[in-house]
Structures are given as C-alpha cells and as structure tokens.
C-alpha cells in the first residue's frame, strides 16, 4: 500500500472545492487549491476562512486549530504547481468537457504514478473522465456531500480501469485522514445517493411548478413528515439549481427516463441566473 496522503490538491474553490480543502487542511494535510483567476482564488479563500470561523464559534475547533488549518492552505492559478501532489480532487463545474480538459492536464503534471486523480462529480461517469488521461488506473470518483464539513459520507467510485490500489488509497484518505464514512458505488450516473436523491428533488420542483402546494408546505411536509433536516426545494437551492440541472441532464443522458428530465421551471430559474442560495435567489430568496 502507498504511503498515506499528506499533500492534497483541490481543483476549484466553489462550495464543494472550498469544503474539501477546508476539511483536508483541518485534518492536517498540506492543501494546494487551484482556481482559474486570482480573484476567484481570493473569493474561495475568504469563504473557507469564514467557514473556519464558524467552526470556532460552534466550538468544533479552537482558534489555534483554525490558524493552523489556514496556514496549510495555499492557492494557485497554475495547475503545473500540482506536480508533487499525492491526491488531487477536482471540484469544478459539472461539465464533462471542462473536467476532461482538467484531467488531461493533471495527468501530465502530477508526477507520482501512485498519485490519485479524483473527481467530485455528482453524476458524470468516471470512465469518460478517465479516458481523457493516459493513466486511467489512477482516476476515480471521490464524491463528497454538501456541506462538506458537516456531512460524514464519501462515495468512492471506481471505473472499469481504476486500479484497486488507487481506490484503496483514496478510501484510506477519506476514512482515516478525514474521518468520513465511505461507501463504494458502481460507475453509473448519480452513483448511489444522487441516483435516489435527484429524482426526488426534480419531483418536488414539478410538484411546486404544477401548483400542487406552496414551496413552504412541500418543504415543511418532508421535514416534519419524514424527519428530513431540510425540505427538497431548500435542498435544491443549497446544491445549486445550475448543478441540479447539469446532474439531471447527465442522468437523463445515461438512463433516458423521464424521471431524470429537468422540469421547465428549473430551466427558467437557471436561465434567469436564479441558481439558489449561492446567488441569493433560487426557488427561495436569500437576502
Ligand atoms: N459549512 C460548515 N458548517 C455548516 C454549514 C456550512 N455550510 N452549514 C451548517 N453548518 C453547521 C453549523 O455550524 C452547525 O454546527 P453546530 O451544530 O456544531 O453548531 C450545524 O451545521 C447545523 O447548522 P445550522 O444550525 O445552521 O442549520 P441546520 O440545523 O438547519 O443544518 C444543514 C444545516 C447542515 C445544511 C442541514 O440542514 C442539512 O444537513 N441539510 C441536508 C443537506 C443535504 O442533504 N446535503 C446533501 C446534498 S446532495 C449532495 O451533496 C450531493 C450532490 O452531488 C449534489
Ligand atoms: P460551484 O458553482 O460552487 O463552483 C463551481 C467551480 O467551478 C468554481 O470553482 C468555478 O470557478 C469553477 N468553474 C466554473 N466554470 C469553470 C470552467 N469553465 N473552467 C474551470 N473551472 C470552472 O459548484 P459546486 O457546488 O462546488 O460543484 C462543483 C462540483 O462538485 C460539480 O461537479 C458538482 O456536481 C459537484 N458536487 C456538488 C455538490 C453540491 O451540493 N453543490 C455536492 C457534491 C458534488
């Protein structure tokens, strides 16, 4: 078995990349985060520092642990800086062409043949991302859940080409370094959780769109009737309606079943730029 991962790269500092970088730094890893521009990197860093402050306020970490985690985080706009990384987790937009381009570059720059190149994709088959590289054995899915510092699960997804040593190294990082619970999923769009969750979110949007009930009552129904921490419409806003739309499209392309088809209201909200909590407005408003 390869040595335990201590040098992590994270591609993208959006909600998920920021969360993955934060939990990795809190766990003691040296974390290098890539963003496309200095401005995006600064925004990502500010969100991570805010989240670390929140963890201090709620008594999860001390001020000293926050400062140490912050010191372990470095930002770059040059993927070539990832040469010495032992594990890279890609967490950029849910778009196959964009991810494939990033994996092609990562495969060229990350020198250690035992390094793992992981995607946090919600729905894109890992096999298709892996074929953008010359070393598909080290490519796999490492799927975290939002918010990353709170939710304990990680799905590990091997493609037909993934080596068992790469999967074992990623699983060891998730469970032993980050302290997450791991499940292994087959390389089918949506894996385990989103294959079940996303049709439910889309059904809730259809229910709301049809005038069946108010958004508040749909959410209240599932929170109080099924003990969910959050209703499906609030959850769709939390995930990001743009991301829900991308995931629905990927799952529809894979399975060709209407249950995965994005409803018109979802399309209109995304077209309007009302993509959920991260933009201040989605199905709900976030003043
Ligand atoms: N980052 C860090 N910590 C956060 C956080 C964030 N963004 N949001 C909430 N927290 C922490 C709070 O600090 C608080 O911690 P303490 O209990 O230690 O004080 C705790 O979480 C609870 O937060 P709140 O009291 O503010 O609010 P809440 O009780 O309503 O919980 C929630 C908020 C954690 C988001 C909860 O509602 C929840 O778990 N919702 C369901 C989320 C979910 O289902 N996520 C999966 C989405 S699907 C996915 O991720 C896969 C995909 O590919 C799309
Ligand atoms: P986000 O909108 O918060 O961030 C998107 C990231 O992609 C940013 O870093 C942005 O700079 C980058 N990006 C956008 N367009 C790009 C381009 N053309 N080239 C390079 N980088 C680009 O999204 P997110 O919620 O962090 O989702 C990121 C990934 O994680 C997606 O694959 C998504 O499916 C997956 N994911 C999301 C959730 C969730 O609940 N939001 C949960 C698990 C997995």
Image (spheres, rainbow, N blue to C red):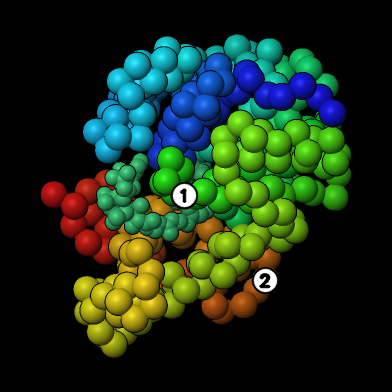
Residue wearing tag 1: 151
Query: Residue 74: where, in percent of width, then height?
Result: 47, 14
Nearer to me, 174 or 102: 174
Quadrant housing residue 220: bottom left
Left or right: 202 as drawn, with respect to 253: left
Quadrant housing residue 80: top right
Residue at x 23%, y 79% (from the top left corner): 217
Residue at x 47%, y 26% (from the top left corner): 26
Q: Name the element at disc 2.
A: helix
Residue at x 52%, y 27% (from the top left corner): 27
Disc on res. 207: none
Relative to 24, say whether 68 is above or below.
above
Left or right: 250 as drawn, with respect to 61: right
Does residue 18 appear in this view? Answer: yes
Few, some or many residues within 10 Å of mark 1 (<14, 14–19, 20+) = few
Left or right: 7 as drawn, with respect to 73: right
Nearer to me, 242 or 191: 191
Query: Residue 237: where, in percent of width, then height?
Result: 33, 58
Few, some or many residues within 10 Å of mark 2 (<14, 14–19, 20+) = few
Q: Name the element at disc 1.
A: loop
Query: Residue 243: where, in percent of width, then height?
Result: 45, 53
Q: Earlier in the sequence, mark 2 or mark 1?
A: 1
Q: Residue furthest bottom?
A: 212
Relative to 2, say whether 246 is above or below.
below
Quadrant housing residue 110: top right
Residue wearing tag 2: 255
Separation (CA) of disc 2 from disc 1: 28 Å
Label 1 within 8 A of ligand 1 by Cβ: yes
Query: Residue 158: where, in percent of width, then height?
Result: 77, 48
Nearer to me, 246 or 221: 221
């Amino acid at each position: 078995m390869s040595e335990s991962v201590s040098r992590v790269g994270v591609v993208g500092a959006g909600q998920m990349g920021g969360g993955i970088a934060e939990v990795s730094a809190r766990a003691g890893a040296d974390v290098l985060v890539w963003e496309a521009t200095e401005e995006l990197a600064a925004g990502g860093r500010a969100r991570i520092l805010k989240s670390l402050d929140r963890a201090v306020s709620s008594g999860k970490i001390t001020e000293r642990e926050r400062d140490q985690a912050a010191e372990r985080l470095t930002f770059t706009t040059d993927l070539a800086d990832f040469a010495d990384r032992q594990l890279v987790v890609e967490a950029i937009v849910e778009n196959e062409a964009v991810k494939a381009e990033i994996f092609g570059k990562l495969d060229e720059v990350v020198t250690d043949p035992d390094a793992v190149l992981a995607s946090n994709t919600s729905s894109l088959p890992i096999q298709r991302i892996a074929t953008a590289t010359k070393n598909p054995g080290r490519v796999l899915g490492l799927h975290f859940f939002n918010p990353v510092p709170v939710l304990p699960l990680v799905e590990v997804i091997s493609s037909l080409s993934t080596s068992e040593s790469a999967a074992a190294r990623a699983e060891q990082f998730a469970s032993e370094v980050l302290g997450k619970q791991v499940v292994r999923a087959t390389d089918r769009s949506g894996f385990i959780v989103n294959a079940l969750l996303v049709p439910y979110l889309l059904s809730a949007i259809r229910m709301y769109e049809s005038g069946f009930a108010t958004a508040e009552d749909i959410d209240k129904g599932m929170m109080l009737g099924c003990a969910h921490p959050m209703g499906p419409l609030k959850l769709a806003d939390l995930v990001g309606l743009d991301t829900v739309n991308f995931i629905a499209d990927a799952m529809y392309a894979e399975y060709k079943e209407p249950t995965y088809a994005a409803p018109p209201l979802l399309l209109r909200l995304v077209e309007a730029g009302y993509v959920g909590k991260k933009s201040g407005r989605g199905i709900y408003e976030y003043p």
